[in-house]
Amino acid sequence: MLVLVTYDVSVTTSEGRRRLRTIAKICLDYGMRVQNSVFECDVDPAQFAVLKEELISTYDSNEDSLRFYFLGKKGRQRVEHYGSKPVSDPTSDPLIV
């Protein structure tokens, strides 16, 4: 299933900047960045449960926010992109190693 993960982290303190970096790294483990604080994650339900737990254990509920948008199995067909920074599709684009 395709899940869109968005977050807003307070960076007024060094702890906040650390949380921001940590949350971005966690999201990169499960998906790809499509905007600064927005990630598309193609995960199964078990992977999503782990991702969600990692993010919830990292963010500060008094300072930050997390949002999850569930686009489903056919989520990529529902996404339209315009403008700069085209995003690759890891499920269909070739991978060069």
Image: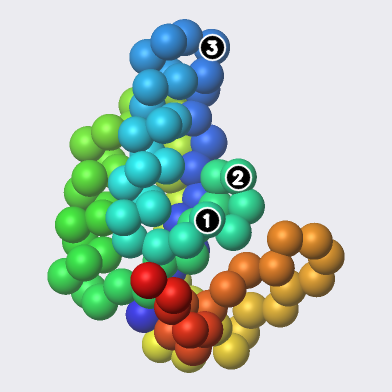
Residue 1, horizontal then vertical, whole percent: 36, 80
Residue located 52% across and 56% down the image: 33
Residue located 51% across and 22% down the image: 10
Which residue is identified by label 1?
33
Residue found farthest to the right: 83
Q: Nearer the viewer, mark 1 or mark 3?
A: 1
Tell me if mark 1 has few (under 14), some (14-19) or many (20+) residues whose alpha carbon lies within 10 angstroms of its own: some
Identity, as a three-letter code, of the amino acid under mark 1: Arg
Rendered view: 83 above or below 10: below
Left or right side of 18 for 74: right
Which residue is identified by label 3?
12
Residue 36, visible in the rendered structure: yes
Residue 67, horizontal then vertical, whole percent: 46, 51
Under circle 3, the secondary element is loop
Q: How far apart are marks 1 and 3 (CA)?
A: 23 Å
Q: Which mark is residue 36?
A: 2
Q: State yes or no: discs 1 and 3 in contact (Cβ < 8 Å).
A: no
Identity, as a three-letter code, of the amino acid under mark 3: Thr
Q: State yes or no: discs 2 and 1 in contact (Cβ < 8 Å).
A: yes
Q: Distance between the residues labelled 2 and 1?
A: 7 Å
Q: Distance between the residues labelled 2 and 3?
A: 17 Å
Under circle 2, the secondary element is loop
Q: Which of marks 2 and 3 is in front?
A: 2
Rendered-image quadrant of the C terminus: bottom left
